Image: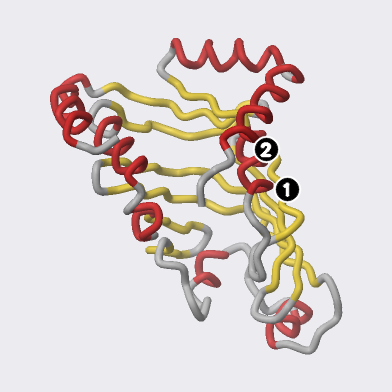
């Protein structure tokens, strides 16, 4: 689905008017080879998605430095719940053929939204689910998404290129082919209402990035 660019620009303009100091913070980070992304951008992206039968609703995204707390209402195997967790990015690996992120989850909560007679509801009521190790629980998902490549204890690893819509997107291919050879992501954290990517330059990859930019379609 194509993103509504006009809506994105309007949202960005309104955000800049409401938060003029954020622009200075973004510029300051850029000088130090850091990319700062307003979390409001993530909120806008979520809100811009078309509603669907299985999509989470009432999604909240709040900075809890150095992590980010996400909450949502969803249907969990026939059980309406409200779930929330604080995520910390432990590692982000980016190359021409890889876009893998390892996330550590904490403060996980899953609350019933209404009384139902389902196995999941029974487990939640009994307290049998160990929410301190959400990675282990993820291994029991009947239809695990292809991007979920590893889950254990409080960590999950996602390989975004396992999702064909992402891997086959020409714009994603262009970014990975031209950016990955020249920079690597050292760390990701939140600061205020910003997601900050701390980058490290790889000057030796400039020629490779330049060649990739010429060969890929626009």
Residue 92 occupies quadrant: top left
The residue at which mark 1 appears reads as: 60
Which label belongs to residue 114?
A: none
Q: Residues within 10 Å of mark 2 (few under 14, many from 20)?
A: some
Left-right relation of 155 to 11? left
Q: Residue at x 60, y 10 (%)?
A: 24
Residue 184: percent from left, percent from top: 31, 31
Q: Residue at x 42, y 56 (%)?
A: 158
Check the image and report above or below for 100 versus 176.
below
Residue 57 occupies quadrant: bottom right
Q: Nearer the viewer, residue 115 or 57?
A: 57
Element marked by disc 1: strand
| Quadrant of the frame with the C terminus | top left
The residue at which mark 2 appears reads as: 64
Q: Nearer the viewer, residue 15 or 88?
A: 15
Q: Nearer the viewer, residue 35 or 44?
A: 44
Q: Residue at x 46, y 29 (%)?
A: 197
């Amino acid at each position: 689905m194509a993103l509504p660019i006009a809506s994105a620009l309007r949202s960005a303009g309104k955000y800049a008017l409401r938060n003029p100091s954020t622009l200075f913070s973004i510029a300051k980070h850029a000088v130090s080879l850091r990319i700062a992304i307003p979390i409001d951008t993530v909120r806008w992206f979520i809100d811009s998605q078309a509603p669907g039968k299985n999509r989470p609703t009432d999604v909240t995204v709040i900075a809890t430095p150095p992590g980010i707390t996400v909450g949502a209402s969803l249907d969990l195997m026939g059980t309406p719940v409200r779930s929330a967790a604080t995520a910390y990015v432990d590692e982000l690996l980016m190359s021409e053929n890889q876009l893998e992120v390892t996330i550590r989850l904490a403060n996980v909560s899953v609350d019933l939204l209404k009384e139902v007679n389902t196995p999941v509801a029974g487990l939640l009521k009994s307290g049998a689910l160990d929410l301190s190790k959400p990675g282990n629980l993820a291994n029991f998902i009947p239809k695990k998404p292809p991007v979920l490549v590893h889950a254990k204890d409080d960590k999950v690893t996602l390989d975004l290129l396992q999702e064909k819509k992402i891997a086959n997107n020409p714009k994603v291919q262009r970014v990975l082919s031209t950016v990955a050879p020249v920079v690597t992501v050292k760390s990701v954290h939140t600061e205020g209402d910003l997601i900050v990517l701390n980058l490290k330059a790889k000057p030796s990859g400039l020629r490779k990035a330049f060649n990739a930019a010429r060969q890929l379609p626009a």
